[in-house]
Structures are given as C-alpha cells and as structure tokens.
Image (spheres, rainbow, N blue to C red):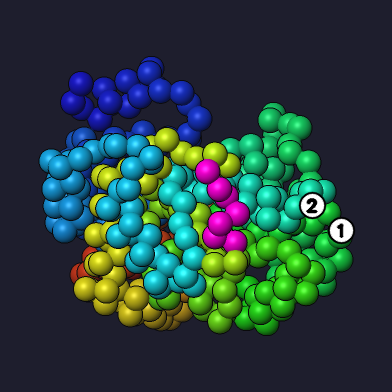
Amino acid sequence: MSTQKELVEATNKYLISNYGRLPIAMVRGRGSRLWDADGKEYIDMFVGFGFGGVCGHCHPKVTQAVVDQAQTLTAAGNYFTNPRQVELAQAIVTNAFGGKVFFCHSGAEANEAALKLARKAAGQGRYKIISFHNCFHGRTMGALSLTPEKFQKGFEPMLPGNVKVNYGDLDAVANAIDAETAAVILEPIQGEGGMHVPSKSFMQGLRQLCDKRNILMICDEVWTSPGRTGKWFAHQLFDIQPDVMTLGKAIGGGLPLAACVAAPKWQDVLGPGSHGCTGGGNPLCTAAGAAAMRLIEEENLLERATQVNKRVTSALTNCGASIVKEIRGSGVMIGVQLDKPGKGVFDTCLARGLYINCTQDTVLRLAPAMNITDADLDEALDILISVLKAQ
C-alpha cells in the first residue's frame, strides 16, 4: 500500500467520510514543502490547516524536543505536575495577560471550556452567549451552536441561548445583551468567515461594553495565535485584553494541542472536577508547543510575519490581475478577495504544486508558516499570480 492511488482507496474504505478529502496522500514535509506519495512536491501556504503555522513542517528543534520527551515520558495524567505544561503555560501567560491555562486537544474543546467558564462565572440564570455571523468556533455541540447554520444542519436542536449579530456592529451587540447574557465570543480576525479584520474602535468599544454590562469577552484565537498576526496574540493589535482566550492549531508546534486561557479575575472559576481533558496537555504535545514558542523569539518570527504580509500584499496589489478585488488580514493570515468563485484558482494552483485554501466561495486564504523562506514565498507568489492573471 504505497502508491497514492492505493492510499486514497484505502482511506475511502476505512475512514469515515466527514472530510472532503483531496485525492492526494501527503507523506513527507519539511519547512514549507510537502511531498505526496507519488513524489510530487508542493509549496504549503496553508501549513496543515494552521497546525504548522509557526515553523512549518518538522522543524529540527521541534522534532528534537518531541524525540527527547518521547524518550523520557509520554503520559502521566493530569493529577501530576507536567513540567512541559508549566513551561508552555508560563510562556503563554507571560506574553498575554497573566492568568492561568487549561490544556486540551483542539480549538473546539478550548471553546467548550471557555463557554463553561463563562456560564459558571456569570452565575445562575445567565447562560446566553453572543457570537457573530460568519464566525467559526468548532464542531462540538457547544461550539457548533455558536457557529453559522450551514454547519448545524442535521444536528439540531442546538444548545439554547445562542444569539448571533453582525461582525463589527457594536450597536447590534449592545441591543442583543440582556439580563441572561453571560459572554460575547469572537475571532479577532475571522478566518473561515473570509479573513475579515474588525476596526480598532469596534474591538475597544466591545471591551468597554462587556465591562459596562458585566459580561465576559472571549477571544477565539485558535487561528490567529501564537504570533501569526505579527503580535503574540491578535487581541494585542487592538490594545485590549479579553477575559478568556482560546488557542489551538499552531500552539502545538504541529501536534494536536489547544488551550483556554483565563485572565487573573477568572482564573479560578473552574475548580477541581468542574472540567477536564484526560490527555490534554500531554508531555509530547506541550514539549512541541514550548519549542515552537521559543522559536518565535529565537528566530524573530513576529517581525517575520509582518515582513511576509508586506511582501504578499505588495506583490498581489501590483500584479495586475483584474480578478483580485481586495487583500486583507494581518501577518501571515491573508485573505485575497476575488470577484468570482476561487475554486478554479485553487485547483490550478494545486495542480502546479501550490497548496492554498478557498473559503466563502470567493476568498483565497494564504496562511504560510511564519518562518517561510523568501525563496519559497517568491515561488509561491509567482505561481499564484500567474494563475490569477490567467482567469
């Protein structure tokens, strides 16, 4: 079972078809490059759907951290202190807003923890959560209840108390708050929703509104952090601090890891027995995550993310492709708004060895590793621009 055709057939035979998988079997990665089972090479501008967002695939220092930990201890359970958890949690809170961290496996799980924390903190009778149209918070039942209806189809009824308003509309949020509201949850940059960046005035106004109405502000930073916007955490772009922040994808350095971070005021709301995740924050994943956090500092990757954004924005703005209507985002989270569906661009890029993403039908998502080389970035842009100009 070694050829791509055989691997794809086996996948279709043995795995549940909940993903719209491409007929490609990726078998190797290094940096911003991937190779499929037939030996074809790709430039990865979406790095494992964000999992490799800090340092790409198989960075030697992350790999070595995992190997060293695998030879020492792989699991002991959360009734014991885990030094790697402590190391990573310290790195997170030091660069964020203090507080404490709960580790789990996925961004959806982190958001579930945040919802439980918000309801418990708000007190009896306050259970409503305000979210935003075109958001994405995960596919577990609580997170799914916050997410747009197209993802909910067939899984109704959703959990009660979920209210959706337009992203960036502060008046709509204010009008949606009532005596039963516990929290507002939002992405500082909408990823699945089309790489939309809210205004600084909206984010600061939302922070003030939450304070005034005594409700929690939850920032879902599963896509935006750590470092991917050019700041350690995307809320820092707006000079605010949330009450709760959720992390996932890149926080594990390529391994499955997520976190719910509670600010000091709320850090002790979830006491013993109130929540848990049996294997959450296991030593292997937290070792990888801690290594990735170190790399952000060692390789000056916050600045690099900003440099990548400038190069991409300049190249696409001046490429002369009439199909491109707008470029938006921050750092290595970049959206390219097209005036027509982007599937043809995606398919052609993939055939030419460039992996990108298309969301909301007409938005190309570029989300390279923060440490992508100039050579890889330039080659990726050459392919993308030639495809865009041919449309």
- Give the residue drawn at x 65%, y 65%: 217
- Give the residue drawn at x 23%, y 38%: 74
Residue behind mark 1: 179
370 inside magenta stretch: no
| Precedes in sequence: disc 1 or disc 2 | 2
Quarter of the image where the N terminus is located: top left
The answer, for residue 370, to whether it is visible in the render is yes
Looking at the image, residue 69 sits to the left or right of residue 118; the answer is left
Give how far across and how far down residue 328 sits, in percent: 53, 73
Looking at the image, residue 132 sits to the left or right of residue 271; the answer is right
Does 277 sit above or below residue 183? above
Residue 126: mark in rendering: 2
Looking at the image, residue 258 sits to the left or right of residue 126; the answer is left
> Front-most of 372 and 341?
372
Give how far across and how far down residue 267 sits, in percent: 54, 60
Three-letter amino acid code at the position of disc 1: Ala
Does 69 sit above or below residue 99? above
- Give the residue drawn at x 79%, y 52%: 126
271 inside magenta stretch: yes
Does 300 sit above or below residue 116? below
The span shown in magenta is: 266-272
Label 1 Cα crowd, 10 Å radius (few <14 / some 14-19 / many 20+): few
Helix, strand or loop at label 1? It is loop
Give how far across and how far down residue 226 sits, in percent: 40, 65
Give how far across and how far down residue 343 sits, in percent: 50, 50
Three-letter amino acid code at the position of disc 2: Arg
The total number of labels drawn is 2
